[in-house]
Image (cartoon, rainbow, N blue to C red):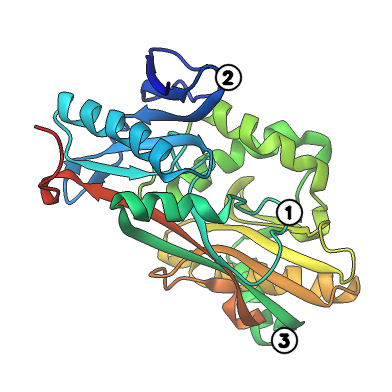
Amino acid sequence: MIKVLKKATCPSSETEFFHCCFEVYNEKEILAKISLYINPYHTIELEQALTIGNFECVNDQGVFNILMDAVVKEAKEVNLSNIIGPINGNTWNEYRLVSTSNAQPFLLDVDTPQYYIDLYKGYGFETLAQYYSEQAENLTDNWEKNKPKYEAFIEQGVSFHEFDMENATRELEGLAELCNASFSNNFLFSPITKEAFVMKMMPSLSIMNPRYTLVAKVDNRPVGFIFCYQNLHDKVDKTIVVKTLARDLDDQYKGMGNVLSSLVMKNVIEDDFTKGIHALMLISNSSTYISSSFAGNFLRSYELLQLKLNNKSWIQK
């Protein structure tokens, strides 16, 4: 017999904004589980959404439906009519589902079973946002094109540095404020504390090469940041992944993304990289600074999903 258990705590869940979690199980094993969050920054059309994440499920639509029926009932009990996800609490953590793929996942890519999105769509979830990653078969050196802007920044008092690995904690603490400000207008953005940002970035130090992770500063204050790393999953080609690009939103720093990306591309070409991946871009996001360095081909796509309960006449009353 399949049963559903509601739990007030779940060790694998994020604590911030956590509401509860559900497990679907039989006499032998857990078949599915999911965590629910009420994140005040997750609003759709000015209405609070119920966020679901930390999701796992066997490939069985019936099991998924039992799990989601419990989620829907909980949403109604807390008077929320829009369920979104999967997001593990906030977008600093893992979120999105793979929807289509032309290749194996790259290092730090979203990696979910293909059937996950089919389960959601089979229940009635619809697309909330779409993302994609693209791969360039050839890298473009745009340094000469962006050199005048680089020199203009230097005259403004901007200095460009490799990430300081010896003082990584201090470097990351400085970048926390920059990234919070730079990403503040991003879809479903939640601010992150300096301490939490450092904790989340620390594991990335093991794959970080300072030549491909640069920081622009004014009076020791970060105003630009780019994080790129080698795709160690690619055993054939030397491939660079562009993961994070942030800048101070003040108008005087317009063009910073182009300068940082051209500096990195110059370095990776010198280091004999032949391919590049621009990772996890929101399709509606027009500010893809690095696009001029890529002649990219589609690699993988991802989705965030939503279920609008008010549109579902079959939801239990």
Answer few, some or many: residues within 10 Å of disc 1's Cα (few below 14, many 20 plus, some between 14 and 19).
Answer: some
**Toward the viewer: 231 or 223?**
231
Q: Which mark is residue 225?
A: none
Q: Which mark is residue 28?
A: 2
Nearest to N terminus: mark 2 or mark 1: 2
Quadrant of the image occupied by residue 76: top left
Q: Amino acid at mark 1?
A: Leu
Q: At 38% across and 50% down in the image, what residue appears?
A: 120
Q: Is residue 259 above or below residue 191?
A: below
On the image, the x and y values in percent for residue 29 come to 57, 22
Quadrant of the image occupied by residue 175: top right
Q: At 49% across and 56% down in the image, what residue appears?
A: 248
On the image, the x and y values in percent for residue 48 come to 20, 38
Residue at the disc numbered 3:
144
Q: Amino acid at mark 2?
A: Lys
Q: CA distance from mark 3 to mark 2?
A: 63 Å
Q: At 42% across and 36% down in the image, what residue appears?
A: 63
Residue 249 seen: yes
Q: Quadrant of the N terminus?
A: top left
Q: Is residue 20 above or below residue 184?
A: above
On the image, the x and y values in percent for residue 262 come to 69, 75
Q: Is residue 279 above or below residue 180?
A: below
Q: CA distance from mark 1 to mark 3?
A: 30 Å
- For label 1, the SS is loop
Depth check, mark 1 against mark 3: the one in front is: 1
Residue at the disc numbered 1:
107
Q: Residue furthest top?
A: 8
- For label 3, the SS is helix
Q: Is residue 168 left or right of residue 75?
A: right
Q: At 64% across and 54% down in the image, what residue appears?
A: 109
Answer few, some or many: residues within 10 Å of disc 3's Cα (few below 14, many 20 plus, some between 14 and 19).
Answer: few
**Toward the viewer: 186 or 137?**
137
